Amino acid sequence: MKKEEILALFQEYEQVACEVNQVECWSARDLQKLLGYSLWQNFTKVIAKAKEACENVGQNLLDHFIDVNKMVELGSGAFRSLNRNFEIHNKTVFDMRYLFLLLTGLVLAVKTWAQSANYDESLVGSYVLPDALTTLDGQKVTDSKIWEKVRRPEIMSMLANVEYGNLPQTPVKTTWRTVEESDNALGGKALRRQVEFTFSGNGVSRKMMVLMYMPRGVRKAPVFISPNFRGNQSTTDDEAVIASQYSEYSRSNQKSRWPFEKIIASGYAVATFHYFDIYYDKRDSMSKSILPVFGVSDAAGLSPSTGKAISAWAWACSRVLDYVLTLKNIDKRRCIVMGHSRLGKTALWAGALDKRFAMVVSNNSGCCGAALSRRNYGETVGRITKAFPWWFCDAFCAYADRPEELPFDQHELLAMIAPRLVYVASAQEDRWADPRGEFLALKESSKVYALYGKETMGDEEFPEVNKLLWRGQMGYHIRSGGHDVTDFDWDAYMRFADEKLK
Ligand code: GCU
C-alpha cells in the first residue's frame, strides 16, 4: 500500500472518531464502511483477528475494545446500548495509529491471502503421489507383513522427522487426581469426572484438566477422546464444569460442537481437554507449553525434527487414553480419537502414533490433516507453515514452496491407521480444507487397507453432499454447511462405530 493511500485513509479514520466519557472512540460500524466491508458479519471476523493480534503483542484487550451489546455508562449516569457496535478506544495517539495500521494491514492481508488461494478445480494441475506401497529402496509391498515390517515404519519416520516432529524421549512423570465427580450429571444420565493431570520432567510441571462424561448403567462404554478449542466450560452449560486455566470463553460458548446428551444417550463416553493446557496455540508460546517438561524451552533447544504443537496435542490424547484404559466402565477395545480442524490433524497424528486407538476421526482437518498436500486447492503447505509454524517441526517449513518434493503425502498419514477404523469428514462450504483433497487421500489410502483384505474406497466416486459413504473400515462424508462440528457429524461417527467397532 502506498504512503499517500495510508495517509488518506488515516485522515478519513480521524474524521469518524467520536468521544465517549472523554475517551476517543471509533465505532466498528464506521470502520467497517471505511475499510470496504459491506457485510457486518464479515467485518466481525476482521475484528476478531485484530483482537487476537492485539493480544499477541501483549496489549490489554480491554484498553482497546469494548465488546458487543455492553451497556456503556455515559457521564450523566445514563446508559446507552451500543447494540452490535463496539468501539476501539485509544488512550494515546500512538495506540490509535497502531490500531489503525493493525486493522488496515489486517484487512489487506486477509483479502490478499483469501483471494490468492486457489478454489478453481481446473487450476489444481497435475501431481504424482508417492506410492504408499513402494519402499524407499524400490521394493513393492505385496502383503501386510512387509507393510508392517518395512514400509509402515519408513513412512512413520518420514512423517515424524519431516512434518509433525518427534517429542524428545525423556521420561515424563504423569499423575492423576480426581478433582470433582458426580454420578448424577446431565439429568441423571451420566457420570461426570474432572481429572487433573500433572506432567513433570526436567524440573518443570504442567497441568491439564480432563472432563469426562460416562453413560450411567453401561458396563463397558466406548469412548471418544477429543480435545476442545475453547476450554472445558465452553463445551457445556453444566455449572459444575471447571473453567480451563487458559480460556476466557464463557460457559457453553461452543456447546453446539459437544452434544453430550446425545453422546451419552447413544451409550458413548467422552473425554475432553482444552488444547491450550498442552500447547498455548499462539506464536512464541513454546516456553509455556508442555515442551519444557521434555527439556525444550526455546527455539535454541529445537532440532529440525523436534515436534511442537501438533505432536504435543497428539501426545496428550494418548495420555488421556492411558487414564481412560484404567477405568472399569470403559471398553478398552473401543477407544476413539476424534478432532476438528487443527485438532483433526492432531487426531490423525495421534491415531497414527498410538495403535490403541481403534478408530480415528478427522473432522474438517484439511491441509496437513486428511487433505493431499500436492493439490493446489484452498490452504497449502506454503500458507500453513507461514501462518502456523509452531504446529510442525522446523524441517517441514523447507517444503513450503515445493510440496511436490515432500517424501510423502497425506494419504500415507491415513494409511498409518490401517487396518483400524478411519473416518474422514468434510463440509461443503469449507473449501479452505479442500474436501475433494480429503476424499482423494482417503481413497488413495485404500491400497493399504486392501493389503488386509478389507473392502475399500478404491473405486468410489466423490459422494453426494450429506450421503454417508462407508466401505469396510473406512468412512467418509461431505455434509452441507461450513467449517464446524455438527450433530450430523456426531451421528455419523457414532452410527459408524456402532456398526463397525466391535
Ligand atoms: C486455520 C488453518 C487450518 C486449521 C483451522 C482450524 O484456518 O489455516 O489449517 O485447520 O485454522 O483449526 O480451525
Image (cartoon, grey):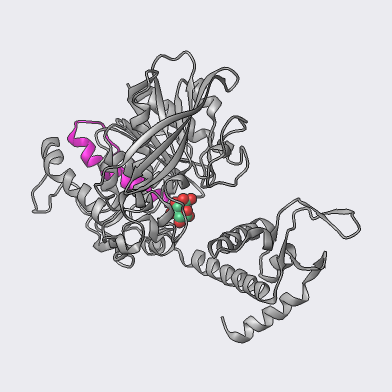
State which quadrant residue 417 falls in.
Answer: top left
- Between 277 and 348, which is closer to the camera in this rendering? 277
> Residue drawn 31% across and 32% down?
357
- Left-right relation of 251 to 351: right
- Give left or right: position of 378 versus 417: right
- Above/below status of 293 relative to 252: below
Asked whether 169 falls inside the magenta stretch, the response is: no
Is residue 356 among what the camera can see? yes
- For the residue pair 408 and 47, the one nearer the viewer reads as 47
Q: Is residue 423 visible?
A: no
* Rendered location of residue 199, percent (x, y): 37, 41
Figure quadrant of the C terminus: top left
In reply to whether residue 454 is colored magenta, the answer given is yes
Of 484 and 63, nearer the camera is: 63
Q: Is residue 80 left or right of residue 286?
A: right
- Main structural element of the magenta stretch: helix, strand or loop? helix
Among all residues in the image, which is located at the extreme bottom? 4
Position of residue 442 relative to residue 123, above or below, is above
Q: Residue 365 appears at what percent x and percent y? A: 41, 47
| Picture layout, residue 260 above or below residue 405 | above
Q: How far from the left and from the top, in percent, is residue 126? A: 30, 61
x%, y% of residue 403? 30, 62
Residue 255 falls in image quadrant:
top right
* Residue plotted at (49% across, 47% down): 428
**Residue lying furthest right:** 76
What is the span of residues highlighted in magenta in the rendered image?
Answer: 431-460
Taking the spot 24% from the left edge, 63% from the top edge, the residue there is: 405
Q: Quadrant of residue 6?
A: bottom right
Q: Residue furthest front?
A: 203
